[in-house]
Amino acid sequence: MGHIRRQELLRAGDRVGVAVSGGIDSVALLRLLIELRRELGIVLSVVHFNHKLRGAESEADREFVAKLACEHGLEFHAASGDVARLAAEEHSGLEAAARELRYGFFHRLLGAGEGADREIEPEVPQGLKSESMGEPCGTAEAVPFPKPTPAEASRTSGVEAQDRESAYRSAGSAAPPKSAKTQGLKPFSELTPNGTAEAVPFQRQNQESAWSKIATGHTLDDQAETVLIRMSRGSGVSGLAAMARISALPGDGEGQIKLVRPLLDIPKARLVATLRAAKIPFADDPSNRDPRFTRARLRGLMGELAREGLDARRLALLARRLKRADMAIEAVVDRAEAELASPPSTPGAVVFNAVGYATLPAEIALRLIGRAVARAGDEGPVELAKLETLKAALDAAQNAGQKGGNARFRRSLAGAIVTIAGRQITVERAPPRRRKALTTGRRGNAKPAKSR
């Protein structure tokens, strides 16, 4: 509770969608936030995405999460997507495809952002007993996390918890929802030929009821695995800083929707012990041990690495220290941008003093040109290796100019054109006929930023 307040991960008035797969981490997160919601003054909903990778097991997980949400009177939002098909179409890994579809689902719920037009199917969990609005579903008795102390309880914001009302409606239920603020699924009045409820597209959130944050159950172990994955891919300082406790939802250009990770400092073993001691059920996902997935393979090495002193805590400590260094570097880039920027002649363009740029340390110059490309282009973030290639060519052109050669330079990257003319470097939107996508995503559907 203390670190949630200190780091302002959640604030009074936040509407939080809790991403719940049904596994240990997400169930523990949901139960924790249910216990703290009154004191924090937040409103919770449950969101679940079915990746369709495990057939009937995936369907069972979806129904488990739906029942869990219903038992606690929380709104429930579910969808599914064909991860395997997307991975094949985009020649990407299953993990990357799954992440892309999940983020698309989040954006669709929020009604904006990249990925909102993805082929995502709204789902209605079947097989759950029909309940009247406002009554808990099922018979399982909730076992709470430890209650806050009286001193903690006295600091409550006074914001009442949301009404305990069912989040979805079974087919044939005619009573209207008590609150229409954030219903993710419209009421269903018709049955399909096979007797199941027909899915209706999600309603878009209005400004009053829109979620401000999505909470995920990433743990200390997940952070350590992320560091290892990014080390194996040759990530830079930013990438090795791994996951932040709070960050913008990828694809949200305005950065208004945040992903929060309240359990990032908590080892998974502690969550397992807590749930088992409280006899709280959770689902087991065998894909967490499937060697087809990079994360699962690295997870299998963690025991051996720990025996050599490279355990999850030390890997997470490395990430925190690199994050501190990354923030310091970004502050220097801010100053360099302020000192070298010139007013552009074209709206949306970025202009730098070429002479001053040539004197910058390599990492500062790299990040500065990367910012400019991201700002002026329209094809999403670019991979670090491609940005380094661009900078190397830019350096070569500047060196040639200093030796009396031709310093003119023109290259495209991620929907932007970078040119040198005289004493200026200009980065601007590429003309339509010249656009050449160098990012890994298709044009107009850029993927989240690659790890740096």
Image (tube, helix red, strand yellow):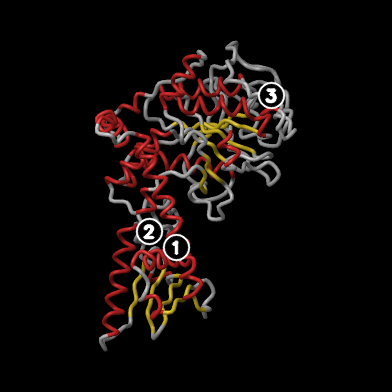
Amino acid type at mark 3: Pro
Tell me the residue at 48%/43% (across/down): 103
**SS class, disc 1:** helix
Q: Position of residue 96 (x, y in %)?
A: 37, 42
What residue is drawn where x is 62% and y is 21%? 147
Specify few, some or many for label 2: CA neighbours under 10 Å numbering under 14, 14-19, or 20 or more: many
Q: Residue 416 location, x and y as percent?
A: 41, 68
Residue indicated by mark 3: 150
Q: Residue 415: x, y in percent?
A: 41, 65
Could you tell me which quadrant the N terminus lies in?
Answer: top right
- Nearer mark to the viewer, of 2 and 3: 3
Packing grade of label 1 (10 A; few <14, some 14-19, many >=20) is some
Contact, mark 1 vs mark 2 (Cβ under 8 Å): yes
- Tell me the quarter of the picture where residue 153 sits: top right
Q: Name the N-terminal-most of marks 3 and 1.
A: 3
Which residue bears the numbered disc 2?
Answer: 382
